[in-house]
Amino acid sequence: MYFNSKSLGLYCHIPFCLSKCAYCDFCSVAGAGRRVKAQYLDALRKEMRIMGKKAEGYVVDSVFFGGGTPTSIGESELKRLIAELYDCFYVLDDAEFTVEANPATVNKRFANTLKECGVNRVSLGLQSAHANELKKLGRIHSLEDFEESYHLLRDAGIENINVDVMFGIPDQTAESFLNTLKYVVSLRPEHISAYGLQIEPGTPFFEHRDTLVLPGEDEEYSMYVYASEFLSENGYGHYEISNFALPGFECKHNKKYWNVDSYLGLGCAAHSLFGGERFGRCEDIQQYVSAIKHGALDSTVVSREVMTLEAMESEYVMLRMRLGEGVDKKAYKALFGFDFDSKYGSKLKNFVDGGFVISDDLSCRFTTDGMYVSNSVLSSILDL
């Protein structure tokens, strides 16, 4: 946990896309002009310089560029941004360095640029292997675009690739989802993320939610269980609710979140757990740019919480339970000074009896069925 370590994860938010997907509620904008992008990236570099001084003494062992679509800002700007990051923070030579990419934005030159800049992990958003489903989602790439990008990254020397897929999307069937999984596994990426579609307020999907033809709850549940079984049979460990990896390729950066380790978020809408505090920055790009221009970075913080031991305990349980290994009871007692079962044993009994949770002498963890309804279980035991 953060108070025992000087290792640090860095997240860098790039809020620009070529096109906004119909389901996306992330802080991102499509079609931003060159001037807006330049102002934002200049502010982001300034934040790096400010926060780099505050992070002196920390060793960065994971970097994650997310968005938005980080690869949409162009090669030269990405190179400049990464160079600034290296100047401001002490990044280990073998740090995991992930960049998210839309297949429509990756060509041969860009793939080589990523490798030259020290990026060693790329997360490619496929979502589906079927053209009709991609169209429903508002994706701007085809399956052919994805496959070309995947092989270009391999040719450039990227040896750690994650592929995102989704289930529960409009017009999708259990059979079509199975076909998507089979296709992805045939490429043998090191990591696969499988996310269930969430209809979020403020998105086109939410506006048209009454007319969407979505799989039923039972079918969506079957998709999730099948994904877990099929990917496990093919060598991908189900190490987190939505994530699967070949041995040794679990995402180091994301595990910082689930292990309640220190991480620093840079850019608008970025969140941090750093220096004994959890804080998040504003989502408004212009507000963020203006504040940094006028030397008022602190004014971009819209949420802040001092992490008391009590607050850390509930977060630790909530986040560790996302992992396949769950809560290690011995480690829990060493951190918080009391037995896990003394606080949660009675609250978990019905979920253990129902086959959603396994609780033994060593750990408490979800079954596959439990992972699917994890939010409900955690809300019940943690009073969220």
Image: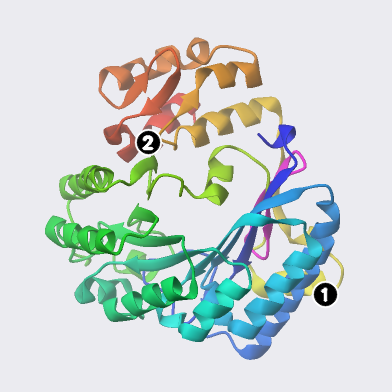
| Nearer to the camera, 43 or 142 | 142
CB under 8 Å between callouts 2 and 1?
no
- Quadrant of the rendered structure where residue 73 is? bottom right
Query: How far from the left and from the top, in percent, is residue 274?
Result: 73, 45
Residue at the extreme left of the image, as rendered: 175
Query: How far from the left and from the top, in percent, is residue 374?
Result: 37, 36
- Badge 2 or badge 1: first in the primary sequence: 1
Is 222 included in the stretch rendered in magenta? no
Q: Amino acid at mark 1?
A: Lys
Question: Relative to 221, does residue 330 appear above or below in the rendering?
Answer: above
Q: Which residues are magenta?
A: 264-281
Question: Relative to 382, does residue 168 appear above or below in the rendering?
Answer: below
Callout 2 secondary element: helix
Quadrant into which the N terminus falls = top right
Q: Main secondary structure of the magenta part?
A: strand
Residue at 73% x, 41% y is 277
**Image position of 250 (left or right of 117):** left
Q: Which residue is mark 2?
A: 374
Query: How far from the left and from the top, in percent, is residue 379?
Result: 44, 32
